Amino acid sequence: MSFGDPNNPYGPPPQQPPAPGYGYPQQAPPGVPPQQPYGAYPTAPPVQQPYGGYPPAGPAVMPGITKAARIMLGLVVLAHVIIAGAYIWVLSRWDEEMANAGISGDTEAGRFADVGKGVVVFFVGLAAVFAVLGLVLLLQYAKGGNGVRVCSIVYGSFAIVTGIFMLAAYGLGLLIMIAAILLIVFSAKRATAEWFRRPRY
């Protein structure tokens, strides 16, 4: 009985190469480059995140364009303080001027004078409220959010109307209009928007 006989049922089984994919890498024929299984996909380069992987933060220092917007807002506030003071001065001399004009004894003329005085009082209150609102916005520029920027744009729009009414007041109305327009332009800039939208910790 010989173990070398291939027809012998008691002999060892013939040696066969292992099936590919079961612990052995598949060998390519000589001269053929090896192929990667399932195809190779290109890999994207790693994304470089600034600030140690955190999303980029807003500016740490107030941009120059935002400082310019704050200056324009301050000019508009100062102009409304001057307007309120001028109307208060007019009120302080109202009765005296009406008496010098001889209107105090005339009932009909006195009624019109009282209406005019009421209009002046209304403008005093309006200018004072406008000055206070502008001052509140001015104080919020360092720590306020995006609402301060939006309110500055709306405030500048109303200030243009004030400037139109004050055009005859020795150039004060023109100054208000120029400062208000620049306030709107500077507040709408991207750098100003980034300043007011910066994260606060």
Image: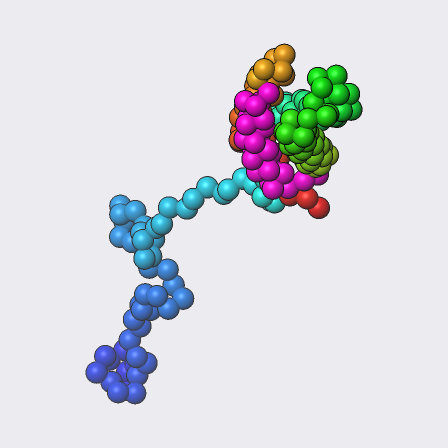
The quarter of the displayed image where residue 140 is located: top right
**Above or below 92: residue 24:** below
Q: Residue at x 56, y 35 (%)?
A: 154
Q: Is residue 171 visible?
A: yes
Magenta highlight: main SS:
helix
Q: Is residue 113 left or right of residue 49?
A: right
Q: Residue at x 30, y 79 (%)?
A: 13
Colour style of the rendered protein structure: rainbow
**Above or below 4: residue 176:** above
Q: Residue at x 60, y 42 (%)?
A: 147
Q: Quadrant of the N terminus?
A: bottom left
Q: Residue at x 63, y 38 (%)?
A: 148
In the image, residue 46 lies in the stretch drawn in magenta: no
Q: Is residue 71 left or right of residue 153?
A: right
Residue 32 spot, x, y in % from top left:
26, 47
Residue 110 spot, x, y in % from top left:
68, 28
In the image, residue 157 lies in the stretch drawn in magenta: yes
Q: Is residue 113 left or right of residue 2?
A: right
Residue 143 spot, x, y in % from top left:
70, 38
Residue 133 spot, x, y in % from top left:
68, 36
Q: Nearer the viewer, residue 181 or 163?
A: 163
The quarter of the displayed image where residue 82 is located: top right
Q: Which residues are magenta?
A: 142-166
**Above or below 96: residue 170:** above
